[in-house]
């Protein structure tokens, strides 16, 4: 009887013990599942971080490669077309060089022309009032002659001459004569400018430079200023008035009529 009574109790204890074991098992399983889930989530997060980092690095590399590719095609294109570019560059360089040579030659020609013209060494200028006659037409013509003579502007000088202009008593063409003299080293344009830097003799018909060429003969008194002008042109009073002299001033002189006609630039008697 006691055995029968104790048996249910034992069963109950066993059931309780089994239930507790199951509960403990469930808790253990739940704890394990929690830990496993947390570990899995951690791995997923870590994987995501690694993936994003790698993806970012790949993007940077891709951007760098793209940038290099954007540059390299131009370089490659330049390299490929280098032959054509070089040919074009050579043509441009030759063209520019030719133009520079032409401009340089022209500049040198102008410089040589100015340097070889004796008129460029004269100090006379349009602001020099000594040569002025008081006749506006005559003075304007004299000023134009000065400007042309300073640079040996033959065309301008030719256009300034009046009909029948006299450059020599032998009938020589004025421009050809002056060009030849300049080429031979005779400073004819400087002489012309020196003549026009003297005080003129003014009459009702024309103006003559220097004054002594028109208003003086041997034995006549002469103002020192006019004598100085004549001497600047190589005049020697003793020679001129000597036994073999002309008896008057016979060196270079020039004359313009009162209406502006340039008539002569000549020397001799």
Image: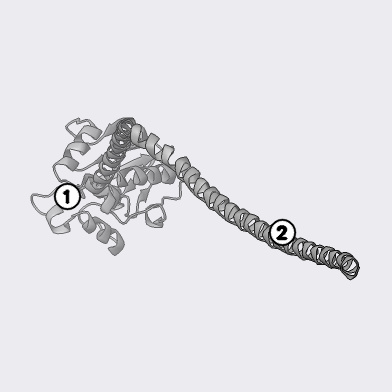
Q: Residues within 10 Å of mark 2 (few under 14, many from 20)?
A: few
Q: Which residue is mark 1?
A: 247
Q: Residue furthest left?
A: 243
Q: Pick the quarter of the image with the C terminus.
A: top left
Q: CA distance from mark 1 to mark 2?
A: 146 Å
Residue 170 occupies which quadrant of the picture? Answer: top left
Task: Kindly state the secondary structure of the residue where label 2 is placed.
Answer: helix
Residue 33: mark: 2
Residue 101: x and y, percent?
27, 39
Q: Please give the name of the residue rendered at 29% of the width and 58% of the height, measured from the top-left corner.
A: 226
Which sits in the foreground, 19 or 164?
Answer: 19
* Residue 79 can be seen, yes or no: yes
User: What secondary structure is found at the residue carrying circle 1?
Assistant: loop
Colouring mode (rainbow / by chain / secondary structure / one colour): one colour
**Count of numbered marks:** 2
- Using residue 199 as the reference point, say whether residue 183 is left or right of it: left
Task: Determine the residue positioned at 84% across, 63% down.
Answer: 15
């Amino acid at each position: 009887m006691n055995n029968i009574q104790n048996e249910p109790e034992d069963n109950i204890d066993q059931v309780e013990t089994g239930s507790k074991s199951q509960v403990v098992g469930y808790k253990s399983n739940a704890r394990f599942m929690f830990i496993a889930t947390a570990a899995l989530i951690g791995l997923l997060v870590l994987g995501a971080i690694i993936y994003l980092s790698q993806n970012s690095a790949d993007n940077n590399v891709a951007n760098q490669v793209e940038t290099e590719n954007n540059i390299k095609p131009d370089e490659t294109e330049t390299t490929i077309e280098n032959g054509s570019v070089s040919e074009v560059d050579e043509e441009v360089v030759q063209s520019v060089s030719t133009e520079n040579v032409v401009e340089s030659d022209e500049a040198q020609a102008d410089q040589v022309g100015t340097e070889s013209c004796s008129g460029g060494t004269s100090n006379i200028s349009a602001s020099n009032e000594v040569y002025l006659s008081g006749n506006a037409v005559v003075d304007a013509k004299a000023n134009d002659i000065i400007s042309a003579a300073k640079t040996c502007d033959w065309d301008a000088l030719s256009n300034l001459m009046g009909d029948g202009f006299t450059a020599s008593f032998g009938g020589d063409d004025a421009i050809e004569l002056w060009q030849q003299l300049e080429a031979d080293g005779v400073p004819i344009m400087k002489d012309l400018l020196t003549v026009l830097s003297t005080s003129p003799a003014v009459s009702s018909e024309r103006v003559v430079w220097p004054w002594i060429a028109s208003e003086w003969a041997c034995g006549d008194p002469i103002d020192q200023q006019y004598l100085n002008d004549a001497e600047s042109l190589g005049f020697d009073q003793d020679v001129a008035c000597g036994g073999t002299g002309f008896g008057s001033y016979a060196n270079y002189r020039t004359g313009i009529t009162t209406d502006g006609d340039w008539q002569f630039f000549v020397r001799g008697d």
